[in-house]
């Protein structure tokens, strides 16, 4: 017997003569294996309604084939789509629906409504809404052609009696009188060919009708994206800029996606380095030290860091810096001294902000970058403009500590109003929300999307609070050491899915933000690590500042290899390998 | 030593004798009747700007307690101890509370409340006349 070989291409089998087919079906009932090979002969076998696909038995075969067919059509593979419908015996749309769609595209409005009525399982309201849409399209097309009387008739006899969407009916009536209104109401340009607005009508109808009747657009793509999202979210170490997600295997990043290796040690400071911060564009790093200077470092395209400016002038150790929103300027704050504003390009000091007899303790920018605020050690807060003039002043509750205040872009001011609480106050509405802790708060930092706050506590815990609506405690991170010093933490990684912190035991700690799991304890420094800053633009780089006078730049553990392959022009990094 | 994180208190307080770092509020005094080799000591509800040493068991007049020495975080001088574990129910009230030795602190208005000779620097052989 010929013809029942499984490795024959399906097309061949389809074209075999009717006699052969009959033979095949006879044989297949005896030796047909259960499963997919049996299904390829489905042309001759009717499909069973409740058949399922997959090992879990939850995927209904009919639905599965239909969304694949739909995807084929969407991608433009008309022939493949038609063939699949034929071969599987599962049509994408029932004949009535296909007729309906064809009639809509051809503009046979009245017939299409009749056909619509023949499609079973339609709820009354859905039927009415769909009819409304069809007649609305008829109305617009008639108007466009200039058939005002016919359009009016449609409105009166066909649309209005449906008794839904009365406001829309009034708008349509208005269209008759003023054609310009018509322009606004019709989706898209008025001058387009009828066919493309009809396509849009079909899309609207498809959204309206139950999905079993007309398969939703791009359903298969949506399901695959959903699966990829789940994989990505369950990948703890996920930290890539481009989603290197493949459909072939489940996505699972290795530990090597987190920077764990020191790729550079910056040793230019002459004393402890207390604070550091990358610029918003990730191109510069500012480091502040007990040696009273701030250094600006440039990061080039190969992630190499080099010294750009030394900003000297403070007479006291620099405890805090703040980048302007456009990264052109930097504020530096000396401890209970003055605040200086520097130009990044030239390295010159543009302005000195001071209050005679008092010392400034913190600084920050207003969201627009035209004003800045400074905290004063008499618990007040001053607002200044870029020319050095004081424009506002108010008495805060507690302004003695460092990063006392942050102005969020959406108008909320975050400040510490007590040792154990943080106040979030809306500037316009004065509405207040409070984060209350049991232990004293030493510092806090805000995420890039301004939805979360990391709060460092004196009991050696870091708490994550969500601040989008009412403040809610989301997670706690533990393990690092903090008994005496101001140790700072930050968000990091692509999508800010990691939390990094310094520690008094000279290690850098990295946790997974979502689960709170401690991922890495990185040795390297020989003194307490005071501050960590993650590059906002390059998720594979962060930097740490330490009491050992150095700043370490951390990258991926295979980063050296990458530099060699990338043929960096820096001779000493290539070791001669091609 | 990094950027020290200092807390600041409001009101009448005791500060470190050598560096004047704020340590505890007068309002937080629970008892003034304690003594140690270095003179008087007060029991406080709460102390700030102190770091804890290793836990150790010490024999006091009232029994064997587990305590940890307190050091000023700014200058490191020893200022007292904290009770971690008390031996029986009567002494339970001391757990989690702080002793500041008066010889090592200064009242806010500048007077030194310590009296007598300084026999040794540490408070290791401290006795207390608790009730």
Image: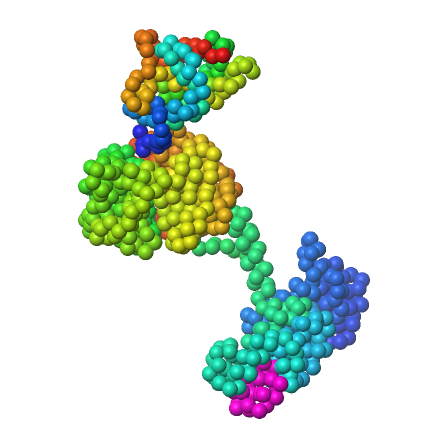
Which quadrant holds residue A289?
A: top left
Q: Is residue A531 left or right of residue B96?
A: left
In x, y percent, where is residue A247? 55, 56
Residue at image coords 66%, 68%: A210
Q: Is residue A483 left or right of residue A384?
A: right
Tell me the quarter of the image containing the N terminus of chain A: bottom right
In x, y percent, where is residue A475? 50, 41
Which quadrant holds residue B123?
A: top left
In x, y percent, where is residue A523? 39, 33
Residue at image coords 54%, 55%: A228
Q: Is residue B87 magenta?
A: no
Residue at image coords 21%, 50%: A388
Q: Is residue A149 magenta?
A: yes
Q: Could you tell me if residue A17 is visible in this image?
A: yes
Viewer-closest of A561 and A69? A69
Viewer-closest of A120 and A422? A422
Look at the picture and state if B15 lies above or below A221.
Answer: above
Q: Is residue A321 left or right of residue A123?
A: left
Q: Could you tell me if residue A492 is visible in this image?
A: no
Q: Main secondary structure of the magenta part?
A: helix
Residue numbers of the magenta segment:
A135-156
Residue at image coords 49%, 12%: B131
Q: How is the image coloured?
A: rainbow
Look at the picture and state if A465 lies above or below B107.
Answer: below
Viewer-closest of A190 and A17? A190
In x, y percent, where is residue A511? 46, 40
Query: Tag count in the figure?
Result: 0
């Amino acid at each position: 017997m010929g013809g029942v070989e499984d490795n024959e291409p399906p097309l061949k089998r389809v074209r075999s003569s009717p006699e052969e087919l009959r033979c095949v079906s006879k044989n297949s009932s005896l030796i047909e294996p259960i499963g997919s090979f049996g299904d390829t002969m489905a042309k001759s076998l009717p499909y069973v309604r409740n058949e399922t696909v997959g090992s879990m038995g939850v995927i209904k075969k009919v639905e599965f084939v239909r969304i694949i067919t739909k995807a084929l059509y969407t991608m433009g593979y008309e022939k493949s789509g038609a063939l699949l419908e034929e071969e599987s015996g599962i049509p994408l749309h029932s004949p009535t629906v296909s007729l309906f769609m064809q009639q809509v595209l051809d503009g046979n409005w009245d017939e299409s409504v009749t056909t619509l009525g023949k499609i079973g399982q339609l709820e009354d309201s859905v039927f009415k809404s769909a009819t409304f849409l069809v007649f609305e399209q008829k109305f617009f097309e008639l108007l466009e052609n200039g058939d005002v009387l016919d359009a009016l008739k449609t409105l009166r006899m066909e649309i209005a009696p449906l008794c839904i969407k009365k406001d829309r009916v009034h708008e349509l009536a208005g269209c008759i009188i003023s054609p310009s209104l018509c322009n606004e109401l019709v989706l898209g340009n008025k001058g387009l060919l009828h066919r493309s607005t009809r396509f849009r009508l079909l899309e609207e109808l498809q959204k309206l009708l139950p999905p079993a009747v007309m398969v939703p657009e791009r359903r298969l793509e949506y399901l695959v994206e959903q699966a990829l999202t789940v994989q990505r979210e369950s990948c703890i170490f996920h930290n890539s800029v481009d989603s290197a997600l493949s459909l072939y295997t489940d996505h699972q990043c290795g530990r090597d996606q987190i920077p764990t290796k020191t790729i550079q040690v910056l040793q230019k400071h002459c004393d402890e380095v207390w604070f550091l911060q990358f610029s918003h564009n990730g191109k510069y790093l500012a480091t502040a030290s007990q040696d009273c200077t701030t250094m600006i470092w440039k990061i080039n395209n190969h992630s190499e860091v080099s010294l750009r400016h030394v900003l000297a002038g403070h007479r006291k150790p620099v405890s805090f810096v703040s980048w302007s929103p456009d990264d052109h300027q930097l504020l530096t704050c000396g401890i209970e001294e003055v605040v200086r504003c520097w130009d990044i390009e030239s390295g010159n000091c543009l302005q000195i902000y001071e209050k005679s007899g008092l010392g400034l303790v913190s600084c920050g920018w207003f969201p627009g970058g035209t004003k800045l605020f400074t905290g004063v050690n008499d618990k007040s807060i001053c607002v200044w403009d870029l020319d050095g003039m004081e424009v506002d002043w108010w008495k805060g509750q507690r302004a003695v500590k460092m990063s006392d205040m942050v102005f969020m872009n959406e108008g909320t001011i975050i400040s510490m109003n007590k040792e154990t609480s943080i106040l979030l106050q809306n500037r316009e509405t004065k509405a207040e929300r409070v984060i209350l802790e049991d232990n004293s708060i030493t510092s806090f930092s805000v995420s890039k999307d301004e939805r979360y706050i990391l709060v460092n506590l004196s009991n050696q815990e870091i708490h994550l609070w969500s601040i989008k609506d009412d403040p809610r405690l989301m997670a706690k991170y533990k393990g690092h050491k903090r008994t005496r010093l101001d140790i700072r933490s930050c968000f990091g990684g692509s999508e800010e899915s990691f939390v990094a912190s310094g520690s008094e035991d000279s290690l850098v700690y990295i946790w997974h933000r979502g689960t709170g799991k401690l991922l890495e304890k990185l040795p390297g420094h020989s003194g307490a690590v005071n501050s960590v800053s993650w590059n906002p633009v390059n998720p594979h780089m962060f930097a740490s500042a330490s009491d050992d006078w150095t700043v370490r730049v951390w990258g991926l553990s295979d980063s050296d290899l990458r530099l060699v392959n990338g043929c960096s022009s820096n001779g000493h990094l290539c070791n001669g390998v091609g | 030593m990094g950027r020290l994180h200092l807390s600041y208190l409001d009101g009448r307080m005791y500060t470190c004798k050598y560096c004047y770092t704020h340590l505890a509020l007068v309002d937080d005094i629970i008892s003034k009747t304690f003594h140690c080799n270095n003179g008087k000591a007060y029991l406080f509800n709460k102390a700030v700007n102190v770091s804890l040493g290793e836990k150790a068991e010490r024999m006091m007049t009232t029994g064997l307690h587990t305590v940890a020495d307190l050091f000023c975080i700014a200058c490191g001088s020893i200022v007292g101890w904290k009770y971690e574990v008390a031996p029986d129910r009567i002494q339970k009230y001391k757990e989690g509370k702080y002793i500041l030795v008066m010889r090592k602190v200064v009242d806010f208005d500048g007077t030194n409340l310590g009296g007598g000779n300084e026999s040794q620097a540490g408070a290791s052989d401290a006795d207390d006349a608790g009730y």
